[in-house]
Structure formats: structure tokens, C-alpha cells
Image (cartoon, rainbow, N blue to C red):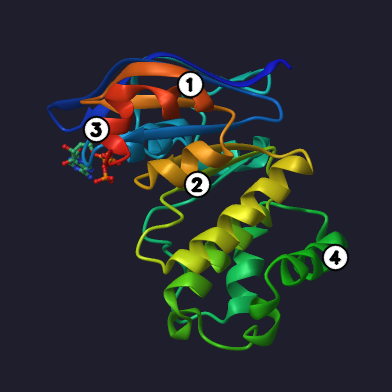
């Protein structure tokens, strides 16, 4: 499959600090790619740079035939990439339904937004029940479902997921990862950042290990999961 996303030797960071240095990765069409690494390794910064929220300082990001240099974040969404951020960041005072509608803000095809809302309610039935409730009143797991569903409302080709398992009970994590796998089987490409390396490597096709802003290891997910150094450092074995 051709590459949907090509990140080539990028550098980015905050103020005087470069967090990422010479970082490269790819996501092919139809792949789930996991990025694992310790706290502070630069995983969130990588996603934020790809999404156009943190400024690219050097290198190149190509997405679906477009060069993303100087493309603002909202236009990147329009090109077919959306993000479910770390900590969920739903709008707590807006209802579940309004949160979902916000996810479709870049779209002009208003009639089919209804159909997509229906799809989201089928994907996460609890959101249908809670559609009139304020987002802030949902449980953590429900907020995570809402954040993913909101990202899906822009009909992305590539979904960026930052720590979807964070702070959630194990059975909810399993439920959310099942949905990620189903979405992928329906054709969506996914770049998944996870502290829960075990779960991420189970659903990913390939993986990158990040340490202090650089890729230190990459291979098929099964190979990464079987590597003794990775097992010791990230899988608690
Ligand atoms: P975590 O799992 O803790 O989110 P991470 O691998 O996603 O870790 P980043 O959040 O990308 O790592 O952080 C990488 C480095 O950048 C850290 O040293 C962090 O302190 C720093 N950093 C992150 N966000 C900012 C910011 N807004 N301003 C300044 N420094 C930041």
C-alpha cells in the first residue's frame, strides 16, 4: 500500500527547546501504526506537529499527496486527518450531540452529517443515550468515546489517537481498542500513541519506539513486542 503519511527528518519543539530531532515515520494506507515510549519522549509533540498545531522547524511532512509545510491545522483536518487529543479535551459544557457536531465543522455536506451521527451512535451506543447530556458529565470512558467519535465526524482518512487508554478501566480499554480495530478494518489508517504498549502492539501492524525525540527502534508490531529490550523497558517483563 502507498504511504498516506510521510514524516521525514522533522524537528520541532517549544520556545528554545527542540523536542523532536530528525524524526521520521510513515503510515501506509490501511495501517495501524503505534508510537510507544516513556513519558516525555515526544509522542504528543509528534502528533501535534503532524496535525499542524506545533510548528515544524525542519524536515518535511507529506500527507495524501500534499506537503503540509505551512498548512494551518484546520486545513489539515479538511485534507482528511483528525486528532483525538490526549486528555480527551471534549467541550464539557456542550452536549454530546453538540460535541459531535463540532467535529463536523469543516464539512459542507450538511445532510450527510446526520447519517454520520447515526454511525457514531451505532459505534458507541452509550453516546446515543447520553446525547442530550453535557459532555463534562460523562464518565472518563464515555468522554474518550466522544473524543474519538468527534474526530471521526470529519471523515478522516487518517486518525491520530493520543493515549486513548489513559485513566480508563481495563474493560473500557478493550472496548475502545476493538472499535479502533473495526475502524481500521473498514479502511481507516491510524497513528496511535500509547503508554499502554502491550495493547497498542496487539492491534498495530507496525510500531515506532521513541526516546528523547528520536526513533530508536521500528519494525512490525509483533517483532517489537518480542524484542527483549522492548519487553524489559515498556512491557514490564
Ligand atoms: P507524555 O506521555 O507524558 O505525554 P510524550 O512522549 O507525549 O509524553 P511530549 O508530551 O511530547 O511527550 O513531551 C516532550 C517534551 O516536551 C517534554 O520534555 C515536555 O516537558 C515538553 N513539552 C511538552 N509540551 C510542552 C509545552 N507546551 N511547552 C513546553 N514544553 C513542552
- Disc 2 residue crowd, few under 14, some 14–19, many 20+, Cα 10 Å: many
| Mark toward the start of the polypeptide (2 vs 4) | 4
Q: Secondary structure at mark 3?
A: helix
- Residue 115 numbered mark, or none: 4
- Residue 161 numbered mark, or none: 2
Q: Nearer the viewer, residue 86 or 33?
A: 33
| Mark toward the start of the polypeptide (3 vs 1) | 1
The residues tagged by marks 1 and 4 sit, at their Cα atoms, a distance apart of 40 Å
The residues tagged by marks 2 and 1 sit, at their Cα atoms, a distance apart of 22 Å
Q: Secondary structure at mark 1?
A: helix
The residues tagged by marks 3 and 4 sit, at their Cα atoms, a distance apart of 44 Å
Q: Nearer the viewer, residue 3 or 36?
A: 36
Pointers 2 and 4 in contact (C-beta within 8 Å): no
The residues tagged by marks 2 and 3 sit, at their Cα atoms, a distance apart of 22 Å
Which residue, given by chain and number where applicable, does mark 3 sit on? 233
**Quarter of image, ligand 1:** top left
Q: Position of residue 144 (x, y in %)?
A: 49, 65
Q: Please give left or right for residue 107 compared with residue 115 in the image.
A: left
Residue 213 higher or lower than 82, as above or below: above
| Mark toward the start of the polypeptide (1 vs 4) | 4
The residues tagged by marks 3 and 1 sit, at their Cα atoms, a distance apart of 15 Å
Amino acid at each position: 500500500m502507498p504511504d498516506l503519511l510521510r514524516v521525514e527528518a522533522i524537528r520541532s519543539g517549544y520556545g528554545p527547546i527542540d523536542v523532536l530531532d530528525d524524526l521520521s515515520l510513515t503510515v501506509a494506507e490501511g495501517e495501524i501504526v503505534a508510537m510507544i515510549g516513556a513519558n516525555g519522549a515526544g509522542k504528543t509533540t509528534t502528533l501535534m506537529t503532524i496535525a499542524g498545531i506545533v510548528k515544524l522547524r525542519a524536515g518535511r511532512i507529506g500527507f495524501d499527496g500534499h506537503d503540509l509545510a505551512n498548512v494551518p491545522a484546520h486545513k489539515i483536518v479538511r485534507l482528511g486527518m483528525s486528532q483525538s487529543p490526549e486528555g480527551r479535551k471534549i467541550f464539557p459544557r456542550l452536549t454530546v450531540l453538540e460535541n459531535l457536531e463540532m467535529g463536523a465543522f469543516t464539512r459542507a455536506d450538511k445532510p450527510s452529517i446526520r447519517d454520520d451521527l447515526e454511525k457514531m451512535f451505532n459505534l458507541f451506543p452509550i453516546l446515543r443515550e447520553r446525547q442530550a447530556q453535557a459532555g463534562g458529565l460523562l464518565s472518563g470512558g464515555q468522554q474518550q468515546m466522544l473524543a474519538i467519535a468527534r474526530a471521526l465526524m470529519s471523515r478522516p482518512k487518517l486518525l491520530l489517537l493520543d493515549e486513548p487508554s489513559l485513566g480508563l478501566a481495563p474493560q473500557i480499554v478493550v472496548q475502545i481498542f476493538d472499535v479502533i480495530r473495526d475502524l481500521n478494518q473498514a479502511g481507516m489508517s491510524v497513528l496511535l500513541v500509547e503508554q499502554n504498549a502491550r495493547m497498542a502492539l496487539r492491534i498495530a501492524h507496525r510500531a515506532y519506539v521513541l526516546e528523547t525525540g528520536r526513533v530508536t527502534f521500528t519494525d512490525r508490531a509483533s517483532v517489537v513486542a518480542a524484542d527483549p529490550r522492548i519487553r524489559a523497558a515498556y512491557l514490564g517483563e
